Image: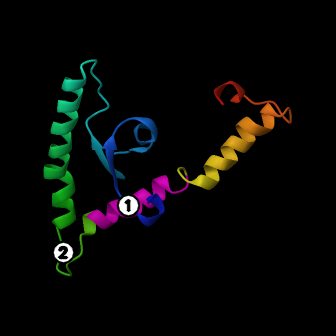
Amino acid sequence: MVLNGGLNLSVLDGWWAEAYDGLNGFAIGAGRTHSNMDVHDNRDGEDLYRVLRDELIPLYYQRDKDGLPRGWIKRMKRTIRTLGWRFNADRMVMDYTQKCYVPAAGGTSSEMRNLC
């Protein structure tokens, strides 16, 4: 999806917390958590609706004289530029091979050995 310019809309955890820069997609909330799941879910729901209403939908439907959503296209290009090289299967396989599998097989030493 990233290489097609698809814009991610998600909570800030996992890879999205690492990758989101404010302009390469959309974030639900600010990465806050709460031990009470009802509070947590309500926050996420309110944040989702706010992002849709105030950011995502207006950006998509704001068109220029040619009918193109220039702001949306700009974000799509940024998504490809900032995420495509970092979050793909090729990079993931190379990281696992070089930092986990080869060291685990005794081929080399690695600082990440304990992380795999």
* Residue 71 part of the magenta segment: no
* Dots 2, 1 in contact, CB < 8 A: no
Q: CA distance from mark 2 to mark 1?
A: 21 Å
Residue extending farthest right: 107
Q: Earlier in the sequence, mark 2 or mark 1?
A: 1
Q: Which mark is residue 6?
A: 1
Residue extending farthest bottom: 66
- Residue at the disc numbered 2: 64
- Residue 62, relative to residue 13: is it above or below? below
- Residue 21, relative to residue 43: is it above or below? below
Instruction: Indicate the position of residue 86 as horizontal and vertical percent values.
Output: 54, 50
Q: Amino acid at mark 1?
A: Gly
Q: Which mark is residue 86?
A: none
The answer to which quarter of the image holds residue 96 is: top right
Q: Name the one closer to the observer, 92 or 78.
A: 92
* Residue 83 part of the magenta segment: yes
Secondary structure beneath dot 1 equals: loop
Task: Tell which tag, 2 or 1, sits nearer the viewer.
Answer: 1
Q: Residue at x 44, y 36 (%)?
A: 14
Location of the N terminus by quadrant is: bottom left
Q: Residue at x 29, y 43 (%)?
A: 27
The answer to which quarter of the image holds residue 71 is: bottom left
Q: Amino acid at mark 2?
A: Asp
Location of the C terminus by quadrant is: top right
Q: Residue at x 35, y 37 (%)?
A: 12
**Magenta segment range?**
72-85
